Image (cartoon, rainbow, N blue to C red):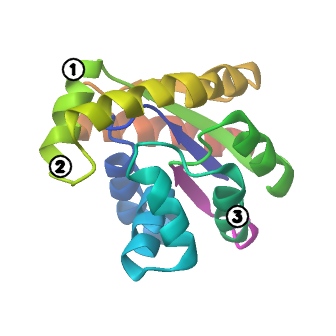
Amino acid sequence: MIVILLGPPGVGKGTQASLAASSRRDQGWQHLSTGALLREEVARGSDLGRQADEFMSRGDLVPDELMVEMVAARVASLGADDVLLLDGFPRTLPQAQALADKAPGGSIGLALYFTAPDSILTDRLLGRGRADDTEEVIAHRLTVYRETTAPLERYYREQGILVEIDADRDIPEIQGSMAEVVGDALARSS
């Protein structure tokens, strides 16, 4: 089953996905962070990394065709009982539609929509210490998120697979909510 993690930058999608995958690896849970994959490509200096870096350094989204190509290969290798926690993809409606086209029928089982106030998100992002996390870039990233990614909330809600998770809580509380929701979805899909 593919679990889409949605929410603005700094909401904790990556932290939650990483914790869930590491504690349930023996149950086939995997975390795919497209942001981490892109940063690895940038660090390696690959063609994809150089192209992506031009967009990322401005706080803009990497174009759909680059992202779809990278994620499609991973989705194709997903086992029937695996749970892929997809963090950072899709970010646009065309990406979501491309993922739906490439994913095996019914494998997108859940979209978790993490929410928190902008002030919390900004503080979290500034605290990471990454070079691209300046107040100006963060404000731009939140605006880009609202314009391009927030419509995915409606897209997955209309499919009946969206569940909101309050991410303005302690990490263990959020983790418990996430595990419960994913567990319920897995039980329904069996």
- Pointer 3: what residue? 75
Q: Is residue 31 above or below residue 111?
A: below
Coordinates of residue 167 in the picture (x, y in percent):
32, 28
Q: Quadrant of residue 82?
A: bottom right
Amino acid marked by disc 3? Val
Q: CA distance from mark 3 to mark 1?
A: 34 Å
Magenta stretch, residue numbers: 76-87
- Residue at left offset 15%, top offset 51%: 129
- Kindly identify which numbered label has been placed on residue 128: 2
Q: CA distance from mark 3 to mark 2?
A: 29 Å
Q: Is residue 85 magenta?
A: yes
Closer to viewer: mark 3 or mark 2: 2
Q: Quadrant of residue 11?
A: top left
Q: CA distance from mark 1 to mark 2?
A: 15 Å
Amino acid marked by disc 2? Arg
The foreground one among 89 and 160 is 89
Q: Element under label 2? A: helix
